[in-house]
Amino acid sequence: MREALQEPAMSSEMSMMLAAARAAGEALLLHHARREAVDIRRKAAGEFVTEADTLAESLLRERLLQPGDGWLGEEGGPAGARHARRRWIVDPLDGTTNFLHGLGHWAVSIALEEDGAIIAGVIHDPLAGKTFRAETGGGAWLDGAPISAAPTRDLDAALFATGVPFGEMPWLGDALADIGRLMPRCAGLRRMGAAALDMANVAAGRLDGYWERRLQPWDFAAGVVIVREAGGVVAPICAGDDLLAEGSVIAAAPGVFAPFAAIIRADSAAGADTALPPGGRGLSS
């Protein structure tokens, strides 16, 4: 932990993001308490949307979207100004399947993008009452305490997380091949079902790395700045790809990033990942 760091003054945008995330979290907790009665719609095999998702996104948009801003939300899609310099990238409920099954691994995720770069991120865990945040140049924080990526340097001591494609997504074979190459080389693997919290846990040093193929931007955008500000490394699986556009991400502690990335990228150089159609997701719904 970065004990010597003093918590920096928050920007007005960060203050707004934190208030919005916590308000959305309170609304989601009310729905979670009566989740058996929540209206559910299936978007695709294994992918669900509930009234909780849509109401939380509406609340976030009302609190965050300013004239001239762009917006990209999981449930409402693009909105706001076209070609805006500033864009909000929001997942009102990352981990919907967990939410519906009563599993305590789901979150509100908000990222602020400016001129194509993610400059601020908030990941709020309502059940735990904990909030991860970062702004460019200000370090990464869990509530009022600084966080940092793990000091791990040995791959065989490292704990990783990922998501696995559900339904009929065609890159299941790639994901299973990744797991098959990594598992003999590391201490363990977790598949928990919420990309935002997996990224936050890399930033907090609880996980040594995370990867997933074909996510949507709202699944991991906030985590990008939080991991980087915590001293971790975030990169596309295929070097040179546009990270948000392609959605195939590796995030890790700096001491294990290179060998970890080499294992995950082993068959991507042959085009296995780039041949896949865009728009799919792993188990982060």
Image: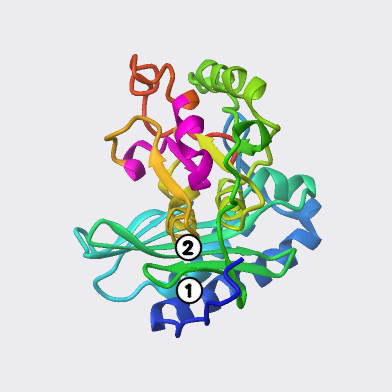
Q: CA distance from mark 1 to mark 2?
A: 7 Å
Look at the numbered disc 1 and give the secondary structure of its residue.
Answer: helix
In the picture, measured across the screen, residue 129 lies left or right of residue 220, that is: right
Mark 1 and 2 residues: CB-CB less than 8 Å, in contact? yes
Q: Residue at x 70, y 32 (%)?
A: 187
Residue at position x 53%, y 77% in the image: 5
Please check the rendered image and state whether residue 250 is part of the magenta-colored stretch, yes or no: yes
Coordinates of residue 275 in the picture (x, y in percent):
34, 19
Name the quarter where the N terminus is drawn: bottom right
Can residue 285 be seen?
A: no
- Find residue 186 and report its horizontal and vertical position in percent: 65, 29
Quadrant housing the C terminus: top right
Span shown in magenta? 243-262
Residue for point 50% across, 19% down? 174
Foreground residue among 281 and 120: 120
* Colour pattern of the rendering: rainbow
What residue is disc 1 on? Answer: 17
Q: Is residue 125 above or below residue 278?
A: below
Q: Which residue is mark 2?
A: 110
Crowd class of label 2 (few under 14; some 14 to 19; many from 20; radius 10 Å): many
Give how far across and how far down residue 152 sits, in percent. Answer: 60, 45
Which corner quadrant of the image does residue 193 belong to?
Answer: top right
Residue 188 magenta-highlighted: no
> Furthest-front residue in view?
153
